[in-house]
Each structure stands twice: as C-alpha cells, then as structure tokens.
Image: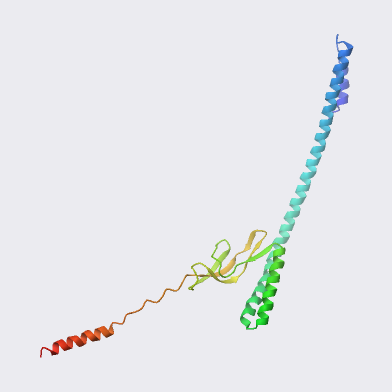
Amino acid sequence: MINFETELNKLLSLETGELPDYEFAEIAAAGREILAEFDKKQTDTSLQIEEIYDLVKEQDFLRETAASERARADRLIPAIIGLADLLEDFYAYAGQSGSEELKHQAKLQRENAGGILSSCGVLRFGEAGQALNPQYHTVKASVESPFPKEQVVQVLQSGYVYQGAIVRKAAVVVSRGQVPEETSIIDHDDDQEYDKGEQEDEQNSWY
C-alpha cells in the first residue's frame, strides 16, 4: 500500500523557487486533501478486495460441498428406487390377490411412500392412460386394444425424477390402436347352388 504521508513529505522537501509562502501553503493543503482522499480510496479498495477474496473462497467451499452432496445422492438414489420397486411389486401382488383389505393397505403404503419420496426431491411417474412420451417412457411391448394408438395401457416399471433430472424412464406397454373389425365374408354357396339348379331346369325344358 502506498504511504501518502511519506510521499507528501518528499513533495514538500522539493525546491519551491520564488513561490510565496501563502501560495505554497495553499498548494500543500490541497495536496494533503488529495492524498488523504487517495489514501481513503486505497483503504476502501483493499477492504473490497479482501471481501471479494472471502466470497471466492466461500463459493469454492459451496461448490465442493454441493459436489460432495451430489456424489452422495448419486449413491443413495438407486438404493431408494430399488426399495420403491419392491413396494411397487407388493402393490401389484396385492392387486391380484383378491383381498380388498390387502389392496387397500398396499394402496395406502404406496401413496405414503410417494409422499416421502417427493419430500426428498424424488418424483415417481408413469400411469396407464398417459400418452406415450419418449422422453419419459421406454416401450417394452405394444398390444392391440380399444385405446388410442401410442397410449400407455400398462406400466411395467415406474419412472423417477430427482430434482428435475430423469433418473429412470418408465417401462410401459402401449396400444397399437383399436382392433379392426372383422370383414364379413359373403357365402356364395347358396347362389352357386341356385344357379346350378336353374341351369338343370333349363336343360330339362328342352327335352
């Protein structure tokens, strides 16, 4: 840092020639004010530089912390989704069990688990009746059905989003569209028998 008081004393020690004392005093006073203002600005600038340096260090720390948390989440999210898949399997089993009480309890557990996942930033998606979206769905099969073409008719595995990023797409079965109606086949056997009978009658009429 520049010591302006020292620099001012050096200035005052210079030869002043024929300059009157009162003018020299005014110049010296003005110089002191200017140098004092520079000194203040220099001090303020130094403080600002220190603040910027502290902010940079804080940002570096935050980035390192965020990277560490992200790496931790990358390890935990697959495990959490694995547990959610087990619950989804239980929910599917309950739906086929024939027990209304079991179905009800499985549905409640599924909804509660969805709420817990959501509070952690993990969102489940993939429901029957949705339009196919390649960004969110992976088609595993297609079937003929009364539903519109490329509509999800069955979810084989739910998809998940974590903090806005797709962790896994939903595996789905989609509709190929409505089954075409069978074209009615006209049986011409009766007509052929009728024509044959007429021909025989016509032939007999000549005898």
Q: Work out whether residue 31 or residue 62 is closer to the camera in this orientation and state it.
A: 31
The answer to whether residue 42 is left or right of residue 80 is right
Residue at 15 percent of width and 87 percent of height: 202
Label count reads: 0
Residue at 65 percent of width and 82 percent of height: 100
Question: In the image, is residue 153 above or below residue 17?
Answer: below
- Dividing the picture into quadrants, the one containing residue 180 is bottom left
The answer to whether residue 36 is left or right of residue 99 is right
- Dividing the picture into quadrants, the one containing residue 161 is bottom right
- Dividing the picture into quadrants, the one containing residue 136 is bottom right
Question: In the image, is residue 144 above or below residue 50?
Answer: below
The answer to whether residue 144 is left or right of residue 88 is left
Question: In the image, is residue 77 above or below residue 48?
Answer: below
The answer to whether residue 70 is left or right of residue 142 is right
Residue at 79 percent of width and 38 percent of height: 49
Q: Work out whether residue 94 or residue 6 is closer to the camera in this orientation and state it.
A: 94
Q: Which residue reaches farthest left?
A: 207
Q: Is residue 57 visible?
A: yes
The C terminus lies in quadrant: bottom left
Q: Work out whether residue 14 or residue 101 is closer to the camera in this orientation and state it.
A: 101
- Image location of residue 131, percent across then percent down: 54, 65
The N terminus lies in quadrant: top right
Q: How is the image coloured?
A: rainbow
Q: Is residue 15 visible?
A: no
- Image location of residue 150, percent across then percent down: 50, 67
Residue at 88 percent of width and 24 percent of height: 6
